[in-house]
Amino acid sequence: MLFRKRMMPMVIASACSVFVCNAGAADSVIMLGEVPVTAQSNGPLMASNVLTSVDILAGERVHEKNVMNSWELVGQMPGVQLTEFRLGAESGKPSFRAFNGEGYINGIKLLIDGVPSNINNGNMRHFDMISPLDIEYVEVVRGTNDPRYGLHNIGGNINVGTRQGGNYNDMRFTYGSFNTREAQAAFGKEKDGFAQNYFFSKQDSAGYRDHSKSEKYSAGGKWFVTSSDGNLKVGVIARTYNHQAEEAGYLTATELAANRFQSPAKNANDRGNRDMQHLSAHVDWQINPATTLTSKLYFNSMKDDRFVTYTSDNTVAGARQRRTWDEQHYGWVNTLTWRANDKFTLDGGFNVEHQDNEYRRNRYDFAVPTNFSTPAAILNDDSYNLNNFGAYVQAVIKPFDSLKIIPGIRTDKFTGSTKINTSGVTGPLQDYGWINQPKLSVVYSLTPTTSVYGNWGRTFQILTGSRANAYVTASTTPIVAPSINTGKEIGVKFKPVAGTEVRIAAWQQDATDEVANLPSAAITRNLGQTRRKGLDFIVTSQVSERVQAWFSHAVQEAKIVGGYTSSSQSLAGKEVFSTPRFVTNLGADYKLSETLQVGAQVRAQGSYFIDDLNAQGKFGGYVLTDTSMRYTLSKSASIDLQVKNVFDRKYEYVWYDSFFWTTPQPMFSPGAGRAAYVSLNLKL
């Protein structure tokens, strides 16, 4: 109620204020950078044509960024929280709408070129297969009103579009702090209806902490053929990726104060090796001027071998582990779009996904450092599969030019089975039945340049992993209903002055039976009923011919309405752990001359509670500033200088370790200090 009293008048006032504005925008989409957009009279529907809270980041805004992991690029976008573990290959991920990146509640769907790309538990490891230089755009859809996707699409989705077609030869070579060396190359050639695109990247770094060396590469190719009349396009995409890295380990508060960049002796043998592959076939067929079919057949694989030590406490069993994942996902995604006329479009489709997964976890005896040669016990040796069939239909109804109504519905069905190889126990997946998810979006143009919008929809969460409660492996396994999320949002987008776009949105999302589920550690917490709500404010401005600026501020809250801890303590009124109350971005680019451009970006987030009962204090807040400078040598060459965390601010990711210590305590993974990178860009 307090949220409504404070936030709703702001939205209403903003909506009223647009009537005196001299310019605006006739949709609710915010674009960061220049993204090629063409009016569509046929072809599949784009998210920006149908959905409401959509942000699109142009490839030009990511090609020039120096990041250790590609998921960090999304941190430029409004309201996106970055959870930064930074422990070898297990580096972190983005999230938004008050879903955190802890791994317990993976509420964001990842797609790459429209292909589902989460692993079984919802994490986004496949994101790092994509080289920044190969990205065409990143599209973020927020909320519960997108019917196209089911599994993991709880709070929204991220779609990474890679470069397809065109003629280019781009290369980028980087050297910087911590002996970081990176080479990226992206090539495209298109002629007579045949398009070839290739990319390669190699990155090595000594790491900013002791015992944090990292070596990885990724490579891929895309081959597409388009018919002479342009009505049929078919192609294949293939990628491969490997990452080998040392893990510096978490620090206690005492260790952090003594030397925040140390790696404790217990972690000297901690490391990881991650292999991933992708193969997909794509068909886009314009059957007739009104009807379009798109189809994607895909295969994703992930093998991960991680050695990790959580504590030097020799009384805690299970604190020294080797975790091995082997996942193979097969799927088929289809969409059919019928544009009956200017006032009515029908869009629908279905997906089929099958997962063959294995998870092994071994425990090792106490040693400093851990000796991973002989396991003391087998904690997991599980083989499990998951099958999903989902279908949706939505209509775009325009009774008149200024009003667009998009009703839709989606349904999903899951089956599967597991086998615990150590005991021979088998069991089926929980029977969730058909999970129905109605949706509705409305956009109304108050003027040709001003829009107000609202949406309502339902999404769902099911348990993942290889054991109970996801699978019924004993007569005592509790039956768990799917968690149903019901979201609603109202917003306005307008232009207060020419060249400036503003969007303000208030939203709320209520979940039943939410579960904090961490299959890798066999941890399940029933949070019960939760409520997430917030206010998003975004402004982008072409201040002058030489200056671009942007600002976003997301105020958010995630609270438990009703639930209990394992010891029957009430969680009602407590905040969901690891969820900051705000996420802020501020930046500007200034073109000093035809050859010199400078820029700066400030990224901030609030602190957060680290435990269920909110009793251990708040941690994790930060304000970080990055600066950049580009000098253009010629039409084909430029040099970038980037300084990250320019003020050398101390910050860390923090979690509450109540599992691996006799006395539970906060554990810290510090972020990097000031770092500088110089890059040579070539366009041949």
Image (spheres, rainbow, N blue to C red):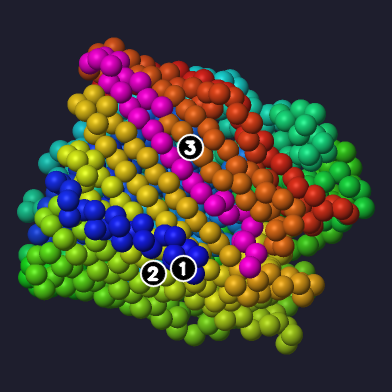
Q: Mark 2 points at which residue?
A: 488
Residue 533 drawn above or below residue 239: below
Marks 1 and 3, Cα distance to the nearest angstrom? 25 Å
Magenta range is 573-600
Mark 3, residues whose alpha carbon is within 10 Å: few (<14), some, or many (≥20)? some
| Nearer-the-camera pick, 331 or 262 | 262
Task: Identify the residue shown where x is 37% and y is 53%.
Answer: 140
Considering every residue shown, the one lying at the far bottom of the view is 475
| Nearer-the-camera pick, 523 or 587 | 587
Considering every residue shown, the one lying at the far right of the view is 315
Mark 1, residues whose alpha carbon is within 10 Å: few (<14), some, or many (≥20)? many
Please tell me which of labels 1 and 2 falls first in the chain: 2
Q: Mark 3 points at which residue?
A: 603
Pointer 1 with pointer 3, Cβ within 8 A: no
Q: Dot 2 lies on which element?
A: strand
Q: Where is residue 407 in the image (x, y as percent from the top left)?
A: 26, 75
Residue 509: assigned label = 1
Q: Dot 1 lies on which element?
A: strand
Q: In which quarter of the image is residue 681?
A: top left
| Nearer-the-camera pick, 592 or 221 | 592
